[in-house]
């Protein structure tokens, strides 16, 4: 009788996990919470929200459009996948996101509101948030090769306003990329920085596999990487480079050759982005306001 090798068994295990995940997604596509209510306790009061329709599903939760029963205000409702409850999945990501958004409520228009954490009628944990109309920046950047410099820079300035509010509250987003940035339209763009599930306090350690948008020291997860607000600054710089060039690139020569006079001195956009995305965090902009001040002149003189 032959015995499968450990390598074969690992491959079989990974295949089984993939099939199980696929089955879960198919099940969520067929089953939903439409028509149920979510009860949230907030400010000493009980608020009820009715779930209207499904908007989309991710790895941990499904998002629905809903409305406040009393005021009819439309909201977004994130509901934890039921099988995660069976595995006793920790709902701390909802709690963390709500806590962070509550700490910065009203601090910047690019940060969404959270109305609280509650439960669906069947007991499933849910989080009720501001409903954001539009699409992700990722879908917007994917539609054409490049975006107008002025518009791209104005989006980056909105993001820096949001991260500055987070940083003043002692928080970091930690996961800024086009999929976590919402825009409502292309004529008068309103930007929202979403998905605070990976956000942390300035003293938390954050480990990540690493992506194009993550600062090198953050991706490595080595000692001394926690508490750096210019991790988020690096990510905003990378997002802006992708908007300007239409692709993920480390070659800043592909950035449009824009120059502005600042205090009588010619400054290149290339140099501003180079400083924002320096591999050495000590050589980057140290605050969101500093990076924003360097970008702002380019937003005023470009479409």
Image: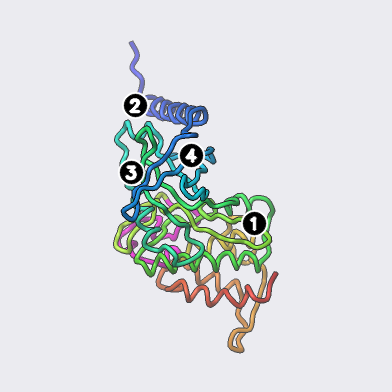
Q: Is residue 176 left or right of residue 221?
A: right
On-image quarter of the N terminus? top left
What kind of element bears circle 3?
Answer: loop
Segment tinted magenta in the rendering: 210-232
| Sequence order check, earlier mark of 2 and 4 | 2
In front: label 2 or label 4: 4
Q: Is 283 placed above or below 191 here?
A: below
What kind of element bears circle 1?
Answer: loop
Q: Is 302 placed above or below 44 here?
A: below
For disc 3, the marked residue is: 91
Please name the residue shown 39% across and 37% down the image. 120
In front: label 2 or label 1: 1
Q: How many marks?
A: 4
Q: Tell me how far mark 2 sits from mark 4, CA to CA.
A: 47 Å
Tag of residue 6:
2
Q: Does the magenta stretch include residue 59?
A: no
User: How many other residues sit within 10 Å of disc 2, few (<14), some (14-19) or many (≥20)?
Assistant: few
Q: Tell me how far mark 2 sits from mark 1, CA to CA.
A: 52 Å
Residue lying furthest bottom in this view?
264
Could you tell me if the residues under marks 2 and 4 are in contact, i.e. CB atoms within 8 Å? no
| Sequence order check, earlier mark of 1 and 3 | 3
| Sequence order check, earlier mark of 2 and 1 | 2
Kindly report the secondary structure that dominates the magenta region of the rendered protein: loop
Q: Is 186 placed above or below 85 here?
A: below
The quarter of the picture where residue 257 lies is bottom right
Could you tell me if the residues under marks 1 and 4 are in contact, i.e. CB atoms within 8 Å? no
For disc 1, the marked residue is: 185
User: How many other residues sit within 10 Å of disc 1, few (<14), some (14-19) or many (≥20)?
Assistant: few
Q: Is residue 230 magenta?
A: yes
User: How many other residues sit within 10 Å of disc 3, few (<14), some (14-19) or many (≥20)?
Assistant: some
Please name the residue shown 68% across and 61% down the image. 187
């Amino acid at each position: 009788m032959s015995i499968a090798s450990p390598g074969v068994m690992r491959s079989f295990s990974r295949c089984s996990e993939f099939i199980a995940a696929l089955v879960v997604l198919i099940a969520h596509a067929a089953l939903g919470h439409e028509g149920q209510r979510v009860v949230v306790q907030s400010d000493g009061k009980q608020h009820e929200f009715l779930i209207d329709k499904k908007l989309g599903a991710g790895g941990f939760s499904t998002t629905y459009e809903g409305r406040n029963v009393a005021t009819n205000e439309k909201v977004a409702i994130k509901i934890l996948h039921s099988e995660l409850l069976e595995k006793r999945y920790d709902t701390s990501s909802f709690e963390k996101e709500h806590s962070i958004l509550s700490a910065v409520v009203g601090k910047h228009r690019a940060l969404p509101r959270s109305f609280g954490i509650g439960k669906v009628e069947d007991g499933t944990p849910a989080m009720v948030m501001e409903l954001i109309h539009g699409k992700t920046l990722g879908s917007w950047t994917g539609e054409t090769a490049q975006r107008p410099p002025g518009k791209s820079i104005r989006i980056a300035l909105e993001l820096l306003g949001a991260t500055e509010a987070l940083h003043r509250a002692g928080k970091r987003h930690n996961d800024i990329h086009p999929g976590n940035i919402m825009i409502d339209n292309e004529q008068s763009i309103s930007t929202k920085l979403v998905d605070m599930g990976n956000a942390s306090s300035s003293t938390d350690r954050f480990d990540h596999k690493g992506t194009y948008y993550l600062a090198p020291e953050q991706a490595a997860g080595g000692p001394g990487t926690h508490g750096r607000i210019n991790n988020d600054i690096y990510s905003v710089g990378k997002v802006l480079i992708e908007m300007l060039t239409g692709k993920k690139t480390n070659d800043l020569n592909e950035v449009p050759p824009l120059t502005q006079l600042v205090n009588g001195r010619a400054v290149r956009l290339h140099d501003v982005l180079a400083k924002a995305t320096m591999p050495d965090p000590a050589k980057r902009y140290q605050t969101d306001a500093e990076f924003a001040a360097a970008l702002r002149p380019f937003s005023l003189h470009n479409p």
